[in-house]
Amino acid sequence: MNPPTNATKIGLLHGQSRPASAALLRRVGGTLVRIYDGNPATAMEMVLRDAHAGAIDILIIDGLNSLAPKPFEALRIVLLLRELKVAVLSAAEDWLPHSLDGLQPALRWLDEQERRARLKAVQRGVARARAEGRLPGRPRASVPARALELVAGGMPVGQAARLLGVAEGTLRRRVAELRADQFRVPSEPLSAEVA
């Protein structure tokens, strides 16, 4: 990143520590073109829009927490801004401007760890639900016994579904399940008792 000049366009994202970020602005120099203030989500939208448009070269922040509530999200935003050629300077984290270059592999690894942790939490929830006798997922759609009787009596599935207000796909699945159950081999071995 080139050193700032008076032609450098600076954006200032305000959080709680206005004096610290204002002092950093004076130290850096350049031209203040935008102050992002107010609702944090709206301010971040404006920062990203201006970064995409090339309207800012440097974004001065109070701290990473002013970018996003979670540290990893804030670092991802910093990396995104760097890809858009916007330097991020933080009043609270003075290490920020020069030490993120090798951080992308670490962030990818952390993303993978978060994904795995979420997956394990879902698997634990499913196991707990099964142990409590609840089935995970969407409840099965009910099919009136009359619809199954009509199909068994020779009526086409589509016609029976329309007649009784059942989704045709649901009725087809139930009919296929019933047919599969008819041909299923019993799980208990048959004993040949001869008297």
Image (tube, rainbow, N blue to C red):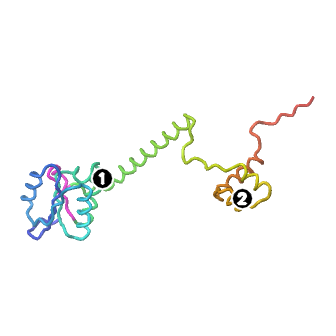
- Crowding near the residue tagged with mark 1, few <14, some 14–19, many ≥20 C-alpha atoms within 10 Å: some
Ranked by sequence position, the earlier of labels 1 and 2 is 1
Residue at image position (70%, 50%) is 177
Stretch in magenta: 86-98
Q: Residues within 10 Å of mark 2 (few under 14, many from 20)?
A: many
To which quarter of the image does residue 166 belong?
bottom right
| Residue that mark 2 sits on | 160
Residue named by callout 1: 73
Q: Quadrant of the N terminus?
A: bottom left
Residue situated furthest top in the rendering? 195
Image coordinates of residue 61 in percent, x first then y, are: 17, 55
Q: CA distance from mark 1 to mark 2?
A: 52 Å
In magenta stretch: residue 87: yes
Disc 1 to disc 2: CB gap under 8 Å: no
Total tally of numbered discs in the picture: 2
Quarter that holds the C terminus: top right
- Residue lying at 77% horizontally and 47% vertically, measured from the top left: 182
Q: Residue at x 10, y 51 (%)?
A: 20
Main SS, magenta region, reads loop
Please tell me in which quadrant of the rendered image residue 162 appears.
bottom right
Q: Kindly state the secondary structure of the residue where label 1 is placed.
A: helix
Q: Where 10 falls versus 74 (above or below)?
A: below
Observer-side mark, 1 or 2, equals 2
Residue drawn at the location 33% of the way across and 55% of the way down: 105
Furthest residue in direction right, as rendered: 195
**As rendered, which of 73 and 112 lies closer to the eye?**
73
